[in-house]
Image (cartoon, grey):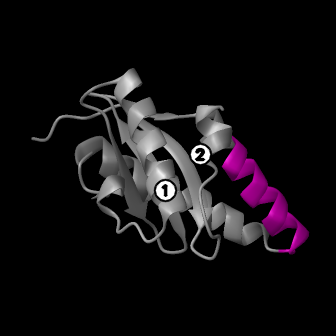
């Protein structure tokens, strides 16, 4: 039997969910937000509890600009301050992409974005 890992939500992840809910309510699509919550609770979190390494490593993404390279370097340094063995991974959902971090046993959900959104706001999450 696979051991269970604790999955925790960060303040930034909760903020992202609030933004998604506000957008979907404004678009008259509350059922889409309910579906997002169902997918998170029924699929994503249980999968990560059992298989925390299932997501693609974020730092293995191809870097296509100097700005992205510099941003990745800053993010790697900040991650190393928190935990030398930490990693950031991506979990692909049906319509969303979740970034999560592993620092040993606990899993931290960092951010969630719709596939059509362009980027993650690392400045808001990690501070300046």
**Depth-wise, is mark 2 or mark 1 nearer the camera?**
2
Range drawn in magenta: 15-28
Compared with 30, 79 (above or below) is: above
> What residue do we see at 17% from left, 35% from top?
3
Q: Residue at x 57, y 73 (%)?
A: 115
| Most foreground residue, 13 or 83 | 83
Front residue of 93/70: it is 70
- The quadrant in which the C terminus is found is top right
**Classed neighbour count for the residue bearing mark 2: other residues with Cα under 10 Å, few (<14), some (14–19), many (≥20):** some
Which element carries disc 2, helix, strand or loop?
helix
Q: Splitting the image into 4 quarters, where does residue 4 fall?
A: top left
Q: Position of residue 24 (x, y in %)?
A: 79, 68
Residue furthest right in the image: 26
Considering only vertical position in the picture, is 34 above or below 109? Answer: below
Give the percent coordinates (x, y) of residue 30.
78, 67
Q: Residue at x 47, y 40 (%)?
A: 74
Viewer-proximal residue among 77 and 41: 77
Residue 16, magenta (yes or no): yes
Residue at (24, 30) in percent of width and height: 85
The image quadrant that residue 87 belongs to is top left
The residues tagged by marks 2 and 1 sit, at their Cα atoms, a distance apart of: 13 Å
Q: In the image, is residue 72 above or below residue 105?
A: below
Q: Residue furthest left?
A: 1
**Magenta stretch secondary structure, dominant:** helix
Left/right placement of residue 14 relative to residue 77 reads right
First in sequence: mark 2 or mark 1?
1
| Kind of element beneath mark 1 | strand
Residue assigned mark 2: 122
Q: Mark 1 packing: few (<14 Cα in 10 Å), some, or many (20+)?
A: many
Q: Quick check: 16 left or right of 59?
A: right
Numbered label attached to residue 98: 1
């Amino acid at each position: 039997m696979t051991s269970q890992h604790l999955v925790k939500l960060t303040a930034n992840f909760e903020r992202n969910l609030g933004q998604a809910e506000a957008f979907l309510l404004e678009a008259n699509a509350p059922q889409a937000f309910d579906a997002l919550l169902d997918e998170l609770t029924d699929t994503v979190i249980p999968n990560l509890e059992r298989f925390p390494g299932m997501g693609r490593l974020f730092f293995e993404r191809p870097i296509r600009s100097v700005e992205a390279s510099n941003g990745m370097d800053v993010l790697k340094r900040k991650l190393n301050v928190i935990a030398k063995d930490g990693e950031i991974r991506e979990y692909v959902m049906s319509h969303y992409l979740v970034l999560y971090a592993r620092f040993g046993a606990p899993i931290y959900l960092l951010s969630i974005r719709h596939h059509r959104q362009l980027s993650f706001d690392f400045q808001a999450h990690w501070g300046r």
